[in-house]
Amino acid sequence: MFHGKFLQFLFRFNSDPKLREDKIVARQSLIQKFLRRSTWFLAGCVLFVLMMILLFRFVNPPTSAFILAYLVTDSDPELQHDWVALSDISPWMPLAVIASEDQRFPEHHGVDFAAIRKAVSEHKKGQGLRGASTITQQTAKNLFLWNGRSFVRKTLEAGLAIAIDAFWPKRRILEVYLNIAEFGRGVYGVEAASRRYFGITASQLSQTQAARLAAVLPNPKVLSAAQPSAYVWGRVAWIRGQMEQLSGLRYLQGLDN
């Protein structure tokens, strides 16, 4: 008896147009509520990140995503990290990273689309795929994101870089980058790297020493500034040549002017 009444109820529920319409409306309402809440959540995340970026224009970040990842994943972490103002860093160092990593740094707005198009064109010609990340993108990655080559991470990196370039002067981008960049296992920032590898402060770096530090940035876990390989010395020579082609220290005078 119960089984028969239950089947009658199901038949009446499925055949009643009003009940079907109410069911559809209820489902649409749930979807709309989910989308509305998801939109507010994403908007809140974006607003929070923008507020952090604006804050870090004036306040030095206490740490970075890469430093935290090192502290969590390394079995025996020995962190070396000392923040210094850009005015306390030898001008050879920002010039060296611009010459090595991002020669269009003063011109682009966080992402160098011209360099990306060139890299893709070279890849199509069989020349291998080279990186086209700007100093601003590397700053965004080191400060907020994780290591890797996923499309999601690269997309987030590009968006953060554009926001950072909009809120920060170029000199501030260089200052943050040079203070959070990884120069070796547990060595973060140019001040710690200068003391570790040369026994001097970042303000005392020579042109060659700055080029040695910049030379290991693409892969600091493998390349060594303390005991440079032939490959690293080759990069040092190339970076020094590029620094001279950029008109030396005069190149930095145009930043944010």
Image: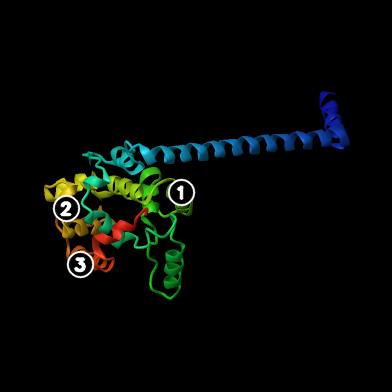
Q: Is residue 185 visible?
A: no
* Element class at badge 3: helix
Q: Which residue matches tag 3?
A: 237
Label 3 Cα crowd, 10 Å radius (few <14 / some 14-19 / many 20+): some
In this view, the residue farthest toward the left is: 199
Distance in Å between CA atoms under marks 1 and 2: 30 Å
- Which quarter of the rendering shows the N terminus? top right
- Tags 3 and 2 in contact by the CB under 8 Å rule? no
* Element class at badge 1: helix
- Tags 1 and 3 in contact by the CB under 8 Å rule? no
Amino acid type at mark 1: Ala
Distance in Å between CA atoms under marks 3 and 2: 16 Å
Q: Residue 82: give x, y in percent of width and height.
A: 23, 40
> Closer to the camera: disc 3 or disc 2?
2
Amino acid type at mark 3: Ala
Camera-nearest residue between 73 and 251:
251
Distance in Å between CA atoms under marks 1 and 3: 34 Å
Q: Which residue matches tag 2?
A: 205
